[in-house]
Amino acid sequence: MQVISKPVQETSTPLQVVLLGKTGAGKSASGNTILGQRAFESKKSSKSVTTDIQTVSAKYVGNDLVVYDTPGFGDPDRSTEEIQEKFQNVLNRTSSGPRVFLLVLKIDRFTEEEKNVISKAEELLGQCLLKQTWILFTRGDELEGRTIEEFIDESEDLTEVVKKYSGRYHVFNNMSSDPYQVNSLLEKKFTGFNSTICPIRNLPERRIILLGKTGVGKSASGNTILDRKCFHSELSTSSITRTTELQKGVIDGRMVSVVDTPGLFDTQLSVEEIAKEIEKSLDLFSTGLHAFLIVMSIKDRFTEKEQQAVENLESLFGSGMSEYAIILFTHGDQLKGHDMKKLINANQNLSRVVEKCGGRYHFFNNNDRGNRAQVRELMEKINRMVEENGRTCYTSDMFIDVAKEKAAVEERKKREEEERVQRRRKITEKDKGERINREKEKMQKESGSIQEEKELNQREEEEINQKEKVKPQTEQEEKIQRDRERLQIVKERIQKEKEGIQREKEIMKEKE
């Protein structure tokens, strides 16, 4: 077997073997047996020989292996907190790719001490990771002609433990160099290797929502975070995500829930439909969410449209969302050595948005999904933000308060508009009344003038009649005829003026 001293690259998918157990159970010796070489220090001692996590990578029959040796449980020189911290470190380092935990027990009496070790291991692993755990018995040479099954049957407690692990056990004689025992171990069907579905007990969940305009890479970022293609992602001018979608996974032993949302300014959905779908995301998190990831593309200039997208989000979730927000830039490969901070500061509007979010930003290269370092760094930023927020969440109650405030503002605007319309109506009615009064006065004056003219004509007619009596008959008749014609013209004019006044009255009545 060829032992490789350098760690396996992140892009490979080796089988990761993690050795657990109490001090003196034979973890390091078992690691050496698997590797076929004295790679870990191993000796009998009341104290743990392994003081820190040790890792050795190797190829075995063409397969990559990474073996992790860990400090022993029950070491008097280490507190429970130290052991848990070391174990957490192992889980973080083995979070990607297949792994198996070997809980090492020596063939001996199954005492309370062994029971406590198993209980401690189960407490750290949790129920889900327990499915990836096998019991590895050491000192197989001490069976003295018995089979391992016969040894297990001798103890009811040990029999119950093996049943709990669904019969997943193996035995090593670390004094023997026979490769069969290693071949036999590796050939057994280790089920549940994939660690991406198993959270670590006592690590609180993280709940995240992806927001942003269409085409910036929200779905691709969700896939990068969860390390699998769970959200549909492709280049398109219209949003591929039409409805709110929730996916879950485990990152470094912590359950993470990610919600993908429709893109802002989607060409196929109305603003109301998009807002309604985004609102649904809060319904998926009854206890609230920890982070808004506002996704933007490094390739796109930060224009008025991007500014409007951020303002739309603030309008929907309220100004308080900035306390829970991180700007996530995609297409990080386009940076090509440029300083992201300098690029942000070069755009005054973008710089203000990042500053409003507490200066929190991160960038992803979604073409390099296997690069888990970028995801771990993002999760660290989210965890810091959670601590800064006093471990509080953005809740549906906060969203409801924003909605109520918006409704109150809209109601006030509506009321003010109605009052303005009422004032305009009163002014219009007053102006109309004054105009009608002026028209009436004008008509009354015109009626008076007509009456005066009528009386004048009547007097003139009487004068003509008087004159006709004293003039000669011929002249008198001619004069009468002329006066009659003139009088007729005046009467016709008066009649026309009366008709005009009548029409104006009818018009005024229609206006009233």
Image (tube, rainbow, N blue to C red):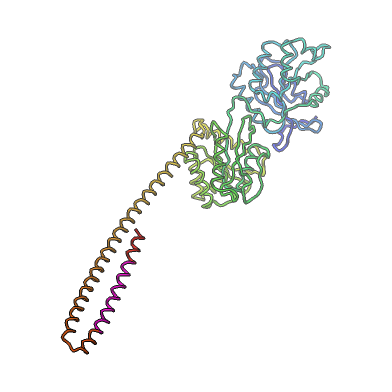
Q: Nearer the viewer, residue 382 or 47?
A: 382
Specify the farthest residue to the left: 470
Q: Is residue 335 visible?
A: no
**Which residue is nearer to you in this view: 75 or 331?**
331
The relative height of residue 323 versus residue 342 in the rendered view (above or below) is above
Q: Quadrant of residue 459?
A: bottom left
Q: Which residues are magenta?
A: 481-502
Image coords of residue 142 (percent x, y): 79, 12
Q: Is residue 166 found left or right of 393 in the rendered image? A: right
**Which residue is pictured at 62% across the width and 37% down the height?**
246
Q: Nearer the viewer, residue 178 or 283?
A: 283
Residue plotted at (73% across, 22% down)? 134
In the rendered image, is residue 387 in sight?
A: yes
> Where on the picture, by quarter, is residue 448?
bottom left
229 vs 298, left or right, is: right
Residue 21 higher or lower than 345, as above or below: above
Locate the N terminus by quadrant: top right
Give the image location of residue 50, x and y in percent. 67, 22
Mostly what secondary structure, the magenta segment?
Answer: helix
Q: In the image, 433: left or right of 379?
A: left
Q: Nearer the viewer, residue 363 or 215?
A: 215
Write the residue at 77% across / 9% down: 154
Query: Is 211 included in the stretch rendered in magenta?
Result: no
Query: What is the x, y in percent for residue 325?
Result: 52, 39
**Horizontal side, residue 387 vs residue 420: left or right:** right
